[in-house]
Image (cartoon, coloured by chain):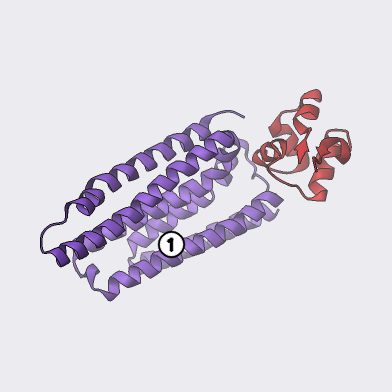
Chain colours: A red, B purple
Amino acid sequence: MRTRIKEFRTKHHLTQEKLAQMVGVRRETIIFLEQGKYNPSLKLAYNVARALKTNIEELFVFDG
Amino acid sequence: MKTKRAFLAVYITALVLTIILISLRAYYVLVAIIAGTLLIGYRELWSLIRLRRLPPVDERVMENTSKSIRNGFIFFAITSVFLMLLFSINVTLNPDTIHFIGGLFISAGAIYALSYLFYDRAEPRLGERGLRMLKMFLMVAGISVAVFILSAFLHNIVSGLVGTEEPVFFIMATILAPLAFTVGIIGSLVIFVKGLFSRV
């Protein structure tokens, strides 16, 4: 799974720490999400998408 | 809220244990408990000092905690079996041996706890190449321990059978295995610490 979290986060001028605070997770979790090393729950994926003012389909790209 | 409860539960339990252990005069265990508690809650304590609030226990941390409990159990089960084996052959009757083995297990436990606690921070910073290197060095260290035990065992058997001192396994156990172990440990430590302090 590929994610576009970093791209959207940079667009909204958010730091990893700030985004982590907005969705109620640790900064490490955002790092793992950005690198595609962690599959989030639907709730977390939705919260991240909402914080970045987009939707889940835009944020998470399934390669197959 | 959940973090605060978990944090309070850990520290209250540690406090009760401290009082009990002081009354039992078990100071070594007490030091281990205090060190362990500080290690478990280092992130929470640091956040409280720096930001005056606790970091959240998110879903990934919850998953890691269950893995940590499982790995910790396996580690201490293996250690216990090994210690019981030593007791069964009376090796630990010598006080020097007891201190040596105790020190070895405390160091191994401390390295295990530290690496597990900081791995979460180091892993995303290491990258695929770094992780491969770390795995390779750790394997070198692990294999060298196995080689040491096997060589010592084979050296004694072969020497007993032949009647003279066997040189190949002796060199492997006394020079090659410790050398490989040192290389493995130093290499993995360098990569781990480098990953810990590099930026993402």
Residue B4 at least partly seen: no
Identify the element where label 1 is drawn: helix
x%, y% of residue B21?
39, 66
Which kind of residue does numbered mark 1 sit on? Thr
Q: Residue at x 84, y 38 (%)?
A: A49
- How many numbered badges does the structure rendering display? 1
- Read off the chain for label 1: B
Above or below, comparing residue A53 to residue B36 in the picture: above
In the rendered structure, the answer to whether residue B131 lies left or right of residue B88 reads: right
Q: Quadrant of the C terminus of chain B?
A: top right
Q: Which of B126 and B174 is in front in this view?
A: B174
Q: Residue at x 33, y 61 (%)?
A: B27
Q: Residue farthest to the front?
A: B162
Q: Which residue is drawn at 73% across and 38% down?
A: A21
Question: Badge 1: how crowded within 10 Å, few (<14), some, or many (20+)?
Answer: some
Q: Which of A60 and A15 is in front in this view?
A: A60
Residue behind mark 1: B18
